[in-house]
Image (tube, grey):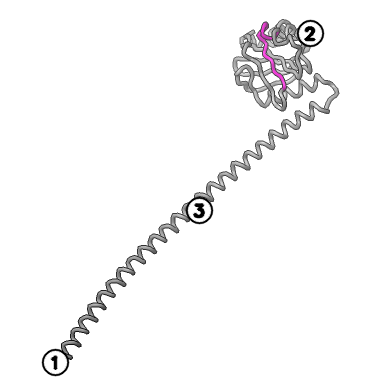
Amino acid sequence: MEKKNVSTLKELMEAFEKDNIEQKKRWAEADKRWAEADRRWAEADRRWAEVDKRNAEAKAEADRRKAEANKRSTELDEKFDKVYKTICGVSDNAGHHAEQYFQNVLAYKLSFGQIKYDYMQPNVRYKRKGEHAEFDIVLFNGNTVAIIEAKNRIHPDFIKEIAEKKVAQFRKYFPLYKNHALYLGVAGFSFDESVEQEAKKYGVGIIRQVGDAIEMDDKNLKVY
């Protein structure tokens, strides 16, 4: 009986040691998995931090662009408010309203007949030895001049006057631009029905107010 008990105790110790080794192995595997989980969580935190950084940068850029757009919108509103006030009450003369409105708009756009100009000169005048002439709006660049006359209401006979009288006056009184291509336009708040027909006949562009903007009909421009 004593020999059998010793043998049984030895087997129990061996079994215990085997279980202990297996348990250590399992704990080591568990520690390995937890370490991998920690690594993945750290990587996830890093990626989320990167996403947060990019979102913050994107928001900052969006806020900057929004502020810039608001600034430009405010500046544009101020310009058109100035034009609107000019139209509605600065002067009692309707023709002066038209001149001021289209001078402001064309000074801002610097474009007519799909041509870009370097600058706009309002109310260009010539007066010498009993002769005089005035041009409401003149656009200039290195080789082209555009003369635009503005009135509250445009009549057909005004088209002929511009094409025949104004061109001759400008060529005579401003010989510096004798080699420049010359284009003509009329600008107004309202037009007689036959104005478009006359404008097409003489190759004169039409600029009209449409709501808060302007509309240009310059498809049939003639070079004078």
* Amino acid, disc 1: Lys
- In the image, 172 versus 200, the foreground residue is 200
* Amino acid, disc 3: Asp
Task: Check residue 109 for magenta coloring.
Answer: no
- What secondary structure is marked by label 1? helix
In the rendered image, the vertical position of residue 27 relative to residue 196, given as above or below: below
* Quadrant for the C terminus in the image: top right
**Mark 3 crowd level (few <14, some 14–19, many ≥20, 10 Å Cα):** few
- What secondary structure is marked by label 3? helix
- In the image, 41 versus 68, the foreground residue is 41
Among the two numbered marks 2 and 3 on one chain, the one whose residue lies closer to the N terminus:
3
User: Taking 220 as reference, is 96 left or right?
Assistant: right
Q: What residue did someone put label 1 on?
A: 3
Tag shown at residue 52: 3
Region in magenta = 198-209
User: Taking 114 as reference, is 44 left or right?
Assistant: left
Give the spatial CA distance, label 1 vs label 2: 146 Å
Q: What residue did someone put label 2 on?
A: 131
Taking the view exactly as shown, the residue that stands out farthest to the right is 92
Q: Comparing marks 3 and 1, which lies closer to the viewer? A: 1
**Mark 2 crowd level (few <14, some 14–19, many ≥20, 10 Å Cα):** few
Q: Comparing marks 1 and 2, which lies closer to the viewer? A: 1
- What secondary structure is marked by label 2? strand
Give the spatial CA distance, label 3 vs label 1: 73 Å
